[in-house]
Image (cartoon, rainbow, N blue to C red):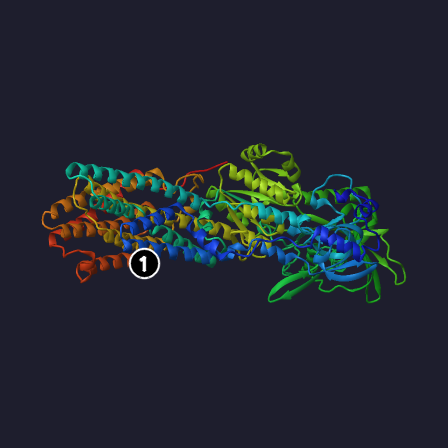
Amino acid sequence: MQYHKQTKDSLFAHFKTQETGLTSAQTERRLVQHGLNQLKTQLEINYLKLFLRQFKSFIIYILLFAICLSVFVGEYLDASIIFIILFINALIGFFQELSAQKSLEALKKINISHARVMRDGQIITLDAKYLVPGDIIQVEAGDRIPADCRILQAEGLSIQEASLTGESVPVTKDQHSLVADVPIGDQKNMLFSSTIALQGSAQALVVETAMRTEIGKIAELMRSTKEELTPLQRRLDAFGKKLGFVIILICIGIMLISMVKVYLNAGLNLESMREILLVSVALAVAAVPEGLPAVVTITLSIGVKKLLRKKTLVRHMASVETLGSCHVICADKTGTLTKNEMTVKKVWSLDGEANISGNGYDPSGQPNHKLTSLIYTAGLNCNNASLYEEDGHWKISGDPTEAALLVSARKAGHLQAVQRLDSLAFDANRKRMSVMVQQADDYCIFTKGATHQILDVCTHVLINGKKEPLSDDHRKIVEEQMNQYAEQALRVLAFAYKPAHKNIKITEEQLIFLGLQAMIDPPRDDVVTSLETAEQAGINVIMITGDYQGTAEAIAEQLGINGSSLSGTDLDRMSAVELKRKLQAGVRIFARTIPQQKQKIVSALQEMGLVVAMTGDGVNDAPALKKANIGIAMGSGTDVAKEASDFVLLDDSFTHIINAIEEGRGIYDNIQKTIMLLLSGNLCEVLIVFMAVVLNWNLPLTAIMILWINLISDGAPALAFAVDPHARDIMKQKVGASSSSILALAQIQYLVTLGIIITIPCLILFHHYQQTSLMLAQTVVFCSVVIAEIALVFAIRLLYSTPQFSNAWLWLTLILSLLLQILIVYSPLAQLFKVETLPGTALLFLLSLGILVLISGSLLSRLFVSSNKYQTRTF
């Protein structure tokens, strides 16, 4: 039922209620029918499921399979080490994401504890969860609305609906029925759960409770919205599948080649089959980068701490990298691009115009033109808000629009309102508010309201301190000025006054027009610069707001967001295909939107292959925040928005989003470096073992040698990559498609070529030294791979233009790896690893190999990999 269209009598008939409210018997039956007025939230966290979820990755599946194979062939040390690595990785991810399971629990915090309701003909106060459809409630200023209600009577009622609709300006409500189909933000005779009464009072009929309220529909959207995998998760999963396919092919190939050779030479038996299987397992262990999951997790964890220092709280660790892949930021206007603080910027009368400096509710600043003080006095006295300082910050109580008038009055030197004798509250029909005040022996009536409604009750105008008749020319000038301000997205209030006497009744007639005060929810100081940076980085910014289309367009123009606009009504008429066509054509502004429409916009962008960031602070933003690849909530926003997001900006600065994206790009680069190092090292090991089997040689590397290389020579430097600085021009590079591989083809070609360059000398050395001793030959290859891995670290950093002396931790790990390798070869540990002391000629070969890798890496970086790793991705 469209409750805003119904009359009072039809609503009473529908809900079988009356002026005296429901009876106790009726409410008991309806509680059974409708249930408690509570929102459904998710079940308690299942810690076991959360822990097991950390193993959902194809690379981890490969490692688990390697553990099983190692146990099967008796390589218990290999199995134990891999298992410990996986367990530690799962613990890190578990504790990092534990708090991320509370998305819907925050909805409980907006439930109302008490409500004043008419029961059995009497007003009682009860827990709001016992409200049912048909109840009649009383609403006063300061109340949070406990359910969706239809207003029966209202006096000067003003509601703050920003958390639900996104519109920053409070909405004036009344009881009159509406005829047209209008969006929620224009349903002036409805009250919605979780919104706040700023002024006035009302009697209202409860029409919907619990999950059937507008806030309940948002909760259901959140429950039904599936969280998207991050680009990193998708890329790593795809990488793992390709890697697994290659490993299976190599192992099968080795097994078949070995079986054919053994069969032709001596025939197959159980012992020979076990040896073949052991070689295949060793090759699988060599091919799988077992340190990759842990290194990626720790890299992301370090990124979390970096972002926290930049005022960005990370709730989902895997989303850190996603920031670097962002193509589009869907920015909520109110509180994100703007300050959510009404500020008077212009004061105008027929004497001239004053620009007022300062922003927000801080009363420092002043007008640059002296106009009649009465226009400020009118705004100061015709006012129900209050302004106060707390902990060094200026705060308000009441309507933000009226608070802005208090601030402008203070800036003009008017600090204190005078004694109020009588008042006429604002209502939707008159669109005016009037007060009678006394100062010393003088009495005066001040009136404020919409411009046309003020002009309708004025007969004179104040010019240069003198009262003159209000002419049609005067009216035309005032209306032109009002329209000019409206085009600048300024909200305009008009003011009038007249002298009064002590005993007369307050009236709104024969007033003297004073002028206009024009205010705005101003853009944040740093937003324009941040938007320019986003444009340089190839990131499109789309503004989404609950405000009117004209206001949205004017704010977008001030911010430098170029593009056409659509309203929520336009969106409802469009299919997903039409919306994508409009986005491609340059629509960048969406006005008068509701939660479902925000989700529709995000879904359309994602279907276009774009990684979408969504910012917001209200309950109405929560479903889109959860649907987006990157949900970014404002620190001052609602708990629901925060719990549905991946990130929370601790001080609401849009600039921190850009800073976080820059950090995310750096993290992605470092993860790429990690994968390249681990993959290149493992590739060398696989090629060396594979070629030795093909050539019918002994194994150049044992299983324990391979594990040592992967954990110490690969793992430690790869971990140090986590704190590598990013390129200075990283925000001038464009972002590739979300479907692109985690490594570009050129990077893979670079690694394969380097792997071959390392493998050939290692095989030559092995063939040369095994004629002397197999153990010596294996020791030479073991040390050769370690030296080549150290050289690879420097070669990979060349690709990213990283200064070689910029990471002290990396140097420390490389020196430690080298010292540990020396310790293994020249200490009693040599018996455990089955290695022996190297001759001087072998040491020269190792040094030459390291230099060869460095020179080759430098030359190949110019040949294979462009300095710009990102490719332009547009609509």
Say whether residue 291 is left or right of residue 199.
left
Residue 743: percent from the left, percent from the top? 36, 42
Where the N terminus falls, by quadrant? top right
The residue carrying mark 1 is 808
Decide which of 520, 814 is in the foreground and name it: 814
Residue 775: percent from the left, percent from the top? 15, 52
Is the residue 502 above or below the residue 228 in the image? below
Decide which of 265, 161 is in the foreground and name it: 265
Say which quarter of the image contains residue 273: top left
Decide which of 280, 328 is in the foreground and name it: 280
Decide which of 750, 520 is in the foreground and name it: 750
Residue 524: percent from the left, percent from the top? 57, 52
Point out the residue furthest to the front here. Answer: 269
Residue 268: percent from the left, percent from the top? 20, 40
Badge count: 1
Point out the residue furthest to the left here. Answer: 772
**Residue at figure coordinates x 60%, y 66% from the top left:** 392
Say whether residue 570 is left or right of residue 152.
left
Quick check: can you spot residue 85?
yes
Say whether residue 640 is left or right of residue 245.
right
Quick check: can you spot residue 332?
no
Mark 1 lies on a secondary structure that is: helix
Circle 1 packing at 10 Å, graded few (<14), some (14-19), many (20+), is: few
Residue type at mark 1: give it: Ala
